[in-house]
Structures are given as structure tokens and as C-alpha cells.
Amino acid sequence: MLIYRWIAFFIAFVSVYILTRPNVDSQWLGWLLSAISCVIWVNVAYKQNDIPRCLMEVMYFVMAVWGVVNWYGY
């Protein structure tokens, strides 16, 4: 499980890096990576029976998907 947490952290770090860059054409990728990171964190939290953290990550996942949808204007 520990390796999944590090992978999720690395993906989250890359997504934050992309989202803070001035190039707005690639921000959809930042939101997508954020959603992927959240899915990994939800899985880890669920397997560890950490329901509050799991629900928090589900909320972040929904917001990341909303960011991608908002970016494309649907």
C-alpha cells in the first residue's frame, strides 16, 4: 500500500505543478492528473478503513472532474 501512496503523491505534485504554470492550454491535464491521484487516494483510504479521508478524496475527485468539464465548457 505504501508504494501507491507515493505514486499518488507524485501524481498530485505533478498536477499542482501543471496547474500553477501560466500555460492554460495544458491545465486540463493538471485536472486530469489530480483526478487520477484522488482515485488512488480513495482506494488506499478505503482499504485502510479511513472513511473520513476516503470521503474527502471523493470530494476532491468530484472537484477535479468538474475542473476538466469546466475547462471544455460542457
Image (cartoon, rainbow, N blue to C red):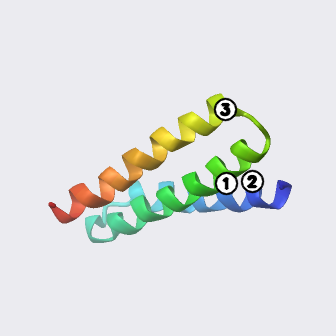
Q: Is residue 16 left or right of residue 26?
A: right
Point out residue 27 in the picture as x, y percentages from the top left corner: 34, 63
Cα distance, mark 2 to mark 1?
6 Å
In-image side of 3 versus 61 (left or right): right
Task: Identify the mark nearer the N-term, 1 or 3.
Answer: 1
Residue corresponding to mark 2: 5
Mark 1 closeness class: few <14, some 14–19, many ≥20 residues within 10 Å: some
Q: Looking at the rendered structure, which numbered label has been put on residue 9?
A: 1
**Badge 3 or badge 2: first in the primary sequence:** 2
Mark 2–mark 1 contact, CB under 8 Å? yes
Taking the spot 76% from the left edge, 36% from the top edge, the residue there is 49
Mark 3, Cα crowd under 10 Å, few <14 / some 14-19 / many 20+, is: few
Residue at image point 49% right, 63% down: 33
Q: Residue at point 16% right, 61% down?
A: 74
- Callout 3, which amino acid? Ile
Q: Nearer the viewer, mark 3 or mark 2?
A: 3
Dot 3 corresponds to which residue? Answer: 51
Q: Is residue 13 visible?
A: no
Q: Residue furthest left?
A: 73
Q: CA distance from mark 3 to mark 2?
A: 16 Å
Side of 16 relative to 28 (left or right): right
Q: Which one is nearer the viewer's eye here, 47 or 74?
A: 47
Residue closest to the eye, 54 or 13: 54
From the image, which quarter does the N terminus lie in? Answer: bottom right
Which residue is pictured at 34% across the width and 70% down the height? 26
